[in-house]
Image (cartoon, helix red, strand yellow):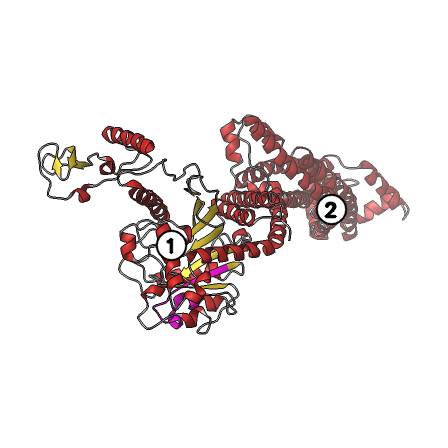
Amino acid sequence: MATMESLIGLVNRIQRACTALGDHGGSGDTAFSSLWDALPSVAVVGGQSSGKSSVLESIVGRDFLPRGSGIVTRRPLVLQLYKIDGGQPEYAEFSHLPQRRFTDFENISVTPTAVGLSPIVRCEKCMKHVCSYRGVFECGAVGAKSEKRWLMVVRIRSVLAFWENVVRKVAALAKKMRIHKRKGGRRDAEERAMVRAEIQDETDRVTGKTKQISSIPIHLSIHSPNVVNLTLIDLPGLTKVAVEGQPESIVQDIENMVRSYIEKPNCIILAISPANQDIATSDAIKISREVDPTGDRTFGVLTKLDLMDKGTNALDVLEGRSYRLPQPWVGIVNRSQADINKNVDMVLARRKEREYFATSPTYGHLSSKMGSEYLAKLLSKHLESVIRSRIPSITSLINKSIDELESEMEHLGRPIAVDEGALLYTLLELCRAFDKIFKEHLDGGRPGGDRIYGIFDHQLPAALMKLPFDRHLSQQNVRRIISEADGYQPHLIAPEQGYRRLIEGALNYFRGPAEASVDAVHFVLKELVRRSIGETQELKRFPSLQAEIAAAAGEALERFREDSRKTVTRLVDMESSYLTVDFFRQLPQEVEKGGNPAAASTVDRYTEGHFRRIGSNVSSYVGMVSETLKTTIPKAVVYCQVRQAKQSLLNHFYAQIGKKEGKQLALLLDEDPALMQRRQQCAKRLELYKAARDEIDSVSWVR
């Protein structure tokens, strides 16, 4: 059966992974479901000066949180407590400093006067760095400021050689003695100051030195034998007005951030209220009731019980008469400001808190269920039960999200290699993927190729039918052309020159439909190239390569169109250059059937009937040629354009990229920034979910 330590530690590790990979909950990337939102947590809510920080420090048993006026907590602090065996060294660790532990003897700040050394100061007269003792400088000048004013913290990693020498002496002496001259009190205060300073520095790193807030959490883990396994999220204190240096929206901004945490159904709300104020005016209770009307997720905590006016008490609240909650109310007695100023040890503060409740005539009967130690155990036990009940749904969410993300990553494609050979191989594979889809369009696997057949079966015949042969072979035009062809000597038997001129003029009309067919097929092929590029999923990542393929294909299609235009023009010219003699040899035979051809020629040579018959003969011959071209033009177009596009559309492009260097190839594979960002987001989120799954699998638990 999973232990409380393993279950809470499991959630702690997953939360740290969430933060490291950019999942901060509802305020993060809305394109993905948030794993952070699915994890149970305890959020600490309270107004400013409600004692929220003191409650956390009492639970931890250490004085480590930043203090000051106004908004001190400007980023959520995820405080993860790990109970270790007694005798082991206590230490703190930040997730953004994973290799650094804040322990008794590593990275500890010390004061030189604590071990009898003089602090380093700058003389106000000679402006040199010298040692002073009780305000007297080595150079002889007497300082007006007290020794306390000149105390300075010496760090191990100081850049000044003198400081390094002092620190080495101090560290060696501290390690040998295990204490400073002022015993453990000063050492603990200074070590706590390091944790406090790191929280402040990390806050400033994101928000700057302003009073702005940020929803990106800070993760602090404390390993100590004096804590229970528990995770708490310290949120900025609720406020009612913006003070100097704060934006006007700060009140609403803080409330929105607090709501974004506590409105989640997996969040346990620790509502901190001061006992010396009316519970009806509590900011924590007000906002908790809005997001948790039944109170099932809310734990009420009353602070400052020892500061209530004489003759008053908080029994009505603690016993649930003023405001009832399903969970019990817990009273807390924190250190006073005087105790904080005197660096009163937290162990002593806890003992004084126990004594207060045990000896109190008002709260004595509740003493077993009061105090920070009881609150920590209560929260830890409740959190463990919530985690245990949520593990199956969390596992289901993780597995479902992993499947979706892996499918998305496969769709987005793998990251691009950097070596020249791999780049060239990737380019060729992408071109082949495009070429395959293009051929599928032509061969019928995808729509589009049928439009080419429609050009030959409908568009070309319709264009041939619309040619102006009636005007060209009108009786008036035939008479004119025959007469012009005869010149000053009229033809004797048949007007052969007139026939040829009429036929050549008619056949010239075929150029238009032939070239129109070439252009129509060209535009269809261009459209298929465009569609094929869009349908090639692998190419969507590379807009530069898409443009290059489109340009290369366009150039190739232009070459194919020019060849096709020349070919169909030759077909028309061939029909004009050599007429089919057999067709005309049949004409006299057809005339003889009606009587004597010589007589007919003599009678009709210059009559209307004679010219009408010539126009009819030419029209029949042109019709025969039209049927021939109706067959040969599509063959020429398919051979010169469609067939070439299938076989060698990107051949010239292949030759060009084969001559490019690695940097030029990399430019072609310059991905769309949006897709790169999407893949990075998916990869990070997939890494998070797999890490969470591994963490869950590493814990043996029983529902």
Identify the residue at horizontal 82%, vertical 45% (top origin): 601
Disc number at residue 462? none
Q: Say if residue 490 shows up in the picture.
A: no
Magenta region, residue range: 268-287
415 to the left or right of 248? right
20 to the left or right of 700? left
| Vertical arrangement, residue 339 with respect to residue 697, above or below | below
Tell me how many marks there are.
2
Amino acid type, label 1: Arg
Judging by the rendered image, the residue that carries numbered circle 2 is 453
Labels 2 and 1: the sequence-earlier one: 1
- Neighbour tally class for label 1: few under 14, some 14-19, many 20 plus, Cα within 10 Å: few
Q: Quadrant of residue 251?
A: bottom left
Q: Residue 577 location, x and y as percent?
A: 72, 35
574 to the left or right of 353? right
Nearer the observer, disc 2 or disc 1? 1
In this view, the residue in front, 185 or 301, is 185
In this view, the residue in front, 231 or 691, is 231
In this view, the residue in front, 302 or 474, is 302
10 to the left or right of 316? right
Residue 283 drawn in magenta: yes
In this view, the residue in front, 606 or 505, is 505
Q: Residue 421 location, x and y as percent?
A: 57, 26
Amino acid type, label 2: Tyr
Residue 408 drawn in magenta: no
Q: Residue 449 location, x and y as percent?
A: 71, 45
- Neighbour tally class for label 2: few under 14, some 14-19, many 20 plus, Cα within 10 Å: some
Q: Are marks 2 and 1 in contact (CB under 8 Å)?
A: no
Q: Secondary structure at mark 1?
A: helix
Q: Quadrant of residue 195?
A: top left
Judging by the rendered image, the residue that carries numbered circle 1 is 351
